[in-house]
Amino acid sequence: MCVCVFSEDLRSYKGPAISLPIDPKFPPISFKTRNIPLAMRKKVDVAIDKLLDQGVLEPISNTKLSTPIVSIIKESGEIRLCADYKVTINKAMKNHPYPIPSVNHILANLADGKFFAKIDLAQAYLQSRN
């Protein structure tokens, strides 16, 4: 018997409000879109339409801050859209008190492990806040 614990539907985040420590002196950066190969454009359009339908994205007419996307082809052939924040908002972030640990640190902590699991947190960051 298989019990499905996870759902493909996006849920709403119910926790406390989250804020990013942005340096107010840092000017907004707006990057031009990157070229998408012709063979991928239709799939990218489908992925964008899906995010619009789910309420993850919303159209805007003008912005002072924009970041380019990176299109990744999944094993299934679908496209995963990722924002390349390292060229925009990450530059404006103040140092975070709890940085993400390095891969070497994580592997050292797993050295004595006996059981491992793999969880695909697809769209984990796309939850909306209600």
Image (cartoon, helix red, strand yellow):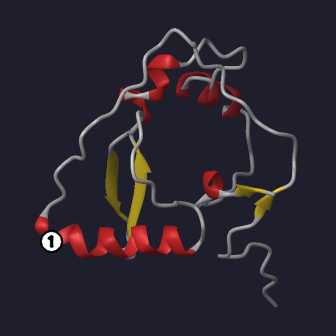
Left or right: 6 in relation to 70: right
Residue lying at 61% horizontally and 12% vertically, measured from the top left: 95
| Residue 92 seen from this side | yes
Q: Residues within 10 Å of mark 1 (few under 14, many from 20)?
A: few
Of all residues shown, which one is farthest toward the front?
A: 61
Quadrant in which the N terminus is drawn: bottom right
Q: Residue drawn at (73%, 33%), measured in percent from left and top?
A: 112
Q: Write down the residue under mark 1.
A: 39
The residue lying at 66 percent from left, 27 percent from top is 20
Q: Residue furthest bottom?
A: 1
Residue 23 in the image: x percent, y percent? 57, 13
**Residue 46 percent across, percent down from the top left:** 37, 76
The residue located at (50%, 18%) in the rendering is: 92
- Between 88 and 97, the residue placed more toward the observer is 88
Up-down relation of residue 121 to residue 38 (above or below): above
Front-most of residues 95 and 99: 95
Residue 73 spot, x, y in % from top left: 32, 64
Q: Is residue 128 left or right of residue 94?
A: right
Label 1 is placed on what type of residue? Answer: Ala
Image quarter hosting the C terminus: bottom right
